[in-house]
Image (cartoon, helix red, strand yellow):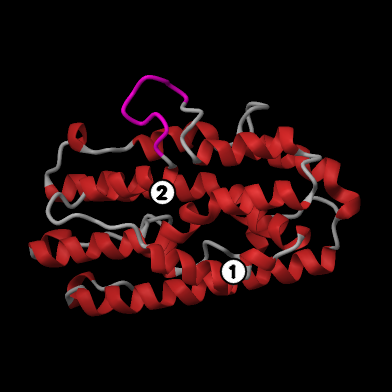
Amino acid sequence: MKMLNFDQYGLLHHAYWQRLLLISDQGNFNFSALDNSRKDRFVDLVYQGFYPLTALSYHVFRRLDESTERKFHNLLAPIYEAELGIHPLIAGTHYDNVPHPEQYRRLMQSLRPTSKLKHEIKVRNDYREAIKLDSAGINELLAYAALVEFNATVMIQALQDFTAKWCVANHFSHRNIEDNFINEHALLEGGESDDQHTSLMRKLFAEIDSKISAEKFDHAARHFVEVHHNYLDQIMGQVEVLLPEQVAVQ
């Protein structure tokens, strides 16, 4: 199966990414129109929208390694072990051995320094069941891993844009933002280096090609996007209720 254009599945073609996370650069929301409680709730919803993807990433890549009887362990292990925080790019900081879902929670917590954000365990579990992760085979797992990995750079850039604009709108200093999740992923994702995760996935595709059913892969990829978009529809419905009319998501 030849390498696909993963954008064809439209994983990021949703208002959550395009408008809320500002991929389109057209989400010029007047955040100052929100009172503090609604600002907190707004960040909660942004947090919830991405949480399942980071919370399940380790499990997707590890199960893919297991489903291929670890024949591609040298390519997959660096990806899912990084999700556990056991291979920090810079060792010796307070992020050592901190899994990426917790790093993401800390990032979002620093954007709303009032009540504590909790891990969205139910959201993760519901999402896991919806994509049938525990019974997924090699074709499904590869589709899930590829969709996330080949869109990861844009995802991180979107989170970076949102964080920067939120800080400016709320007069937050970046000194107080726990942005290691963004900074580390900005270096891990991409394909310029052989050690970056996109490069590892490209090598995997080159080696695993004969084992893949294009039809099953395509079906799984479309199902994953449908699950993601259905979930984000729920998030955006709550956002539109929360925001005053002048900053509503178009």
Percent from the top left, x then y, of residue 93?
33, 23
Q: Quadrant of residue 8?
A: bottom right
Q: Residue at x 42, y 77 (%)?
A: 233
Question: Viewed as shown, does residue 64 lie left or right of 240?
Answer: right
Residue 13's mark? none
**Three-letter amino acid code at the position of disc 2:** Pro
Q: Distance of mark 2 from mark 1, alpha carbons?
A: 21 Å
Percent from the top left, x then y, of residue 129?
56, 72
Question: Viewed as shown, does residue 69 lie left or right of 147?
Answer: right
Percent from the top left, x then y, of residue 15?
42, 69
User: Label 2: which residue?
Assistant: 101
How many badges with numbers are in the image? 2
Is there any visible trace of residue 199 in the rendered image? yes
Q: In terms of secondary structure, where does tag 1 sit? A: helix
User: Label 1: which residue?
Assistant: 225
Q: Is residue 155 above or below residue 225?
A: above
Q: Residue at x 64, y 73 (%)?
A: 223
**Three-letter amino acid code at the position of disc 1:** Val
Span of residues in magenta: 89-98
Q: Nearer the viewer, residue 116 or 153?
A: 116
